[in-house]
Image: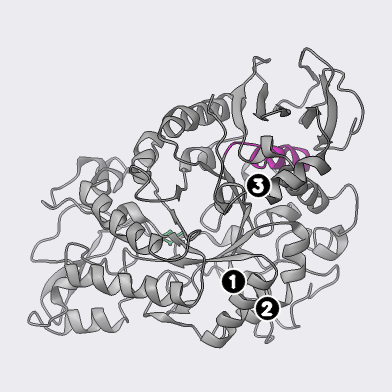
């Protein structure tokens, strides 16, 4: 159980991940772009989200879909221009939407002038900006699974790359690298962005001894070697920089370590990350035992540190959760209730609010060397092909049932997944209990996950039936069904019966309208 806190905006926000190349296209080249995003701000506002996190839009050879950056201070022409981005920031801000950019500190592109200079000669003043060795160790790359070292013919040494050979790792032990990356953050903060999602931030600290790691052989590459004390020093520096700007700028780290306890350390003493992604729940199957453990662990590891949790079910690196959970719409709807009612900031990955499934990509259409195309299909905006994209082909095909799951088909349809997300976000926004309130697990049947959220006299109970058969959930007192994942029983007294794969939010006490005005007065 953890007490409620008065909160900055990101603690009561719902954050929406935009994968720009698949969101919306303004210039009919089959690849989404920044102007395309601008044309869909009405949609995002109506959905009710508070902030947009954009996967990288910087100049890049696109070997890893933009996570290989060759100029941190400019927009790739594929996505538009710096002016387009300024305009997006401005338009979003005028609508009360925050903009979070993706900051990739661990590696650059091999086409970045820093690396070109570094590899040009061993005497280059940028040589030590990257990690060069005469002999490789046994570390493995996360994409492709081969060695994390590539031989450079020109300068006759190996360089380190935790991802593709085209993504050489920077040497964060060199103060010039730290200073250069601080400049990058300043550049964007000065342009008004509200924060950064920080890519694989745990990777910036490497084992200074470069020792062989036995776990690499067991397929657990890099977790161990990446969790290094000096990453925390670097993070404290980044946090000081971000905090020196107006309040409310946020650092959200991708700490891809499969231990919530280790992830908790990346919040520091409230002087490192403001929030961190936590991967165990993202890896979980649709299983109440696993989710119960994940949630308890988040509460017990992060709660005492006052470290604010995040919840993510889908993103651009993993199969969409609807697909992972077996394809059932009922289950995806129940999962939405879970995502949006836990204690912590929920992240919605574009298209999950449409109930999209993965697209099956054959060998000829495959784009991503890491095999992650499935969750990256374009958003279907309209019912009929080309679904709001120009004719011709999009960079990836649409997901199955694109017409029926399109925004046009679902908007205003009371029973649609899209309307469920809208209602859930509105319900969360209107309740301090559901946003920053405390959390406590309630005893229930093993197939039912039930918890209480409360703040002052605002109180909700959430119950999620993971099984496909009816379950009974006994609760003392008079409770009303405020929202049900399948809409059954909404507005009625709760009977204690949960249909198969049904999730409900129950309330007693004050009405939402009164709560909404409390929420408006929260400080940023
Ligand atoms: C994590 C990103 O989410 C992923 O897409 C990328 O391939 C790696 N980091 C490397 O930047």
Return the residue at label 2.
Answer: 36
| Residue 135 place in picture, x, y as percent | 9, 61
Relative depth, front residue between 358 and 187: 187
**Could you tell me which secondary element the residue under label 3 belongs to?**
helix
The range drawn in magenta is 329-343
Are the residues tagged 2 and 1 within 8 Å (C-beta)?
A: yes
**Could you tell me which secondary element the residue under label 1 belongs to?**
helix
Instruction: Name the N-terminal-most of marks 2 and 1.
Output: 1
Return the residue at label 1.
Answer: 20
As measured in the structure, the alpha-carbon distance from the residue carrying label 1 to the one carrying label 3 is 22 Å
**Could you tell me which secondary element the residue under label 2 belongs to?**
helix
Return the residue at label 3.
Answer: 323
Relative depth, front residue between 267 and 398: 267
Quarter of the view holding residue 492: top right
Horizontally, residue 190 falls left or right of residue 225, namely right
Residue 493 is covered by the magenta coloring? no
Q: Residue at x 51, y 26 (%)?
A: 296
Q: Residue at x 13, y 81 (%)?
A: 125
Q: Is residue 155 above or below residue 195?
A: below
Work out whether residue 32 can be spotted: no
Q: Residue at x 47, y 28 (%)?
A: 297
Quarter of the image containing the N terminus? top right
| Residue 266 place in picture, x, y as percent | 35, 45
């Amino acid at each position: 159980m953890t007490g409620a806190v008065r909160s900055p905006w990101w603690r009561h926000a719902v954050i929406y991940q935009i994968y720009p190349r698949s969101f919306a296209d303004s210039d009919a080249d089959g690849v989404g772009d920044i102007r395309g995003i601008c044309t869909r701000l009405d949609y995002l506002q109506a959905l009710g989200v508070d902030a947009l996190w954009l996967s990288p839009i910087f100049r890049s050879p696109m070997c890893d879909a933009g996570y290989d950056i060759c100029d941190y201070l400019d927009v790739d022409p594929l996505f538009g221009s710096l002016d387009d981005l300024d305009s997006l920031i401005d338009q979003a801000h005028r609508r009360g939407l925050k903009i979070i950019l993706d900051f990739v500190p661990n590696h650059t592109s091999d086409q970045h002038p820093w690396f070109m200079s570094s590899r040009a000669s061993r005497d280059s003043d940028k040589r030590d900006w990257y990690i060069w060795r005469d002999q490789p160790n046994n570390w493995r790359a996360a994409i492709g699974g081969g060695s994390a070292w590539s031989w450079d013919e020109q300068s006759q040494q190996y360089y380190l790359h935790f991802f593709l050979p085209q993504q050489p790792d920077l040497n964060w032990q060199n103060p010039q690298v730290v200073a250069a990356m601080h400049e990058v953050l300043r550049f964007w903060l000065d342009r008004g962005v509200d924060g950064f999602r920080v890519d694989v931030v745990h990777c910036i600290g490497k084992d200074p001894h470069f020792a062989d790691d036995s776990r690499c052989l067991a397929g657990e590459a890099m977790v161990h070697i990446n969790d290094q004390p000096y990453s925390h020093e670097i993070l404290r520096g980044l946090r000081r920089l971000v905090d020196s700007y107006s309040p409310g700028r946020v650092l959200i780290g991708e700490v891809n370590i499969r231990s919530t306890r280790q992830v908790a350390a990346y919040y520091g003493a409230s002087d490192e990350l403001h929030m961190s992604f936590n991967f165990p729940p993202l890896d979980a199957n649709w299983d109440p035992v696993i989710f119960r453990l994940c949630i308890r662990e988040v509460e017990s590891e992060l709660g005492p540190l006052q470290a604010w949790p995040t919840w993510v079910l889908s993103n651009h690196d993993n199969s969409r959760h609807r697909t992972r959970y077996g394809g059932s719409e009922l289950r995806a709807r129940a999962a939405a209730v879970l995502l949006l009612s836990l204690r912590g900031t929920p992240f919605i990955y574009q298209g999950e609010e449409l109930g999209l499934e993965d697209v099956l990509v054959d060998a000829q259409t495959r784009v991503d060397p890491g095999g992650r195309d499935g969750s990256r299909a374009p958003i279907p905006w309209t019912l009929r092909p080309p679904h709001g994209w120009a004719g011709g082909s999009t960079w990836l095909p649409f997901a199955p049932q694109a017409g029926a799951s399109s925004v046009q088909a679902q908007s205003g349809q009371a029973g649609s997944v899209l309307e469920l997300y809208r209602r859930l976000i509105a319900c969360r926004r209107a309740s301090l209990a559901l946003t920053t309130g405390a959390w406590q697990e309630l005893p229930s049947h093993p197939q039912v996950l039930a918890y209480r959220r409360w703040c002052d006299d605002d109180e909700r109970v959430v119950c999620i039936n993971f099984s496909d058969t009816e379950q009974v959930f006994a609760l003392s007192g008079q409770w009303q069904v405020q929202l049900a994942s399948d809409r059954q029983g909404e507005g009625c007294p709760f009977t204690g019966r949960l249909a198969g794969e049904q999730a409900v939010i129950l309330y007693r006490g004050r009405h939402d309208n009164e709560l909404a005005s409390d929420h408006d007065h929260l400080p940023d």
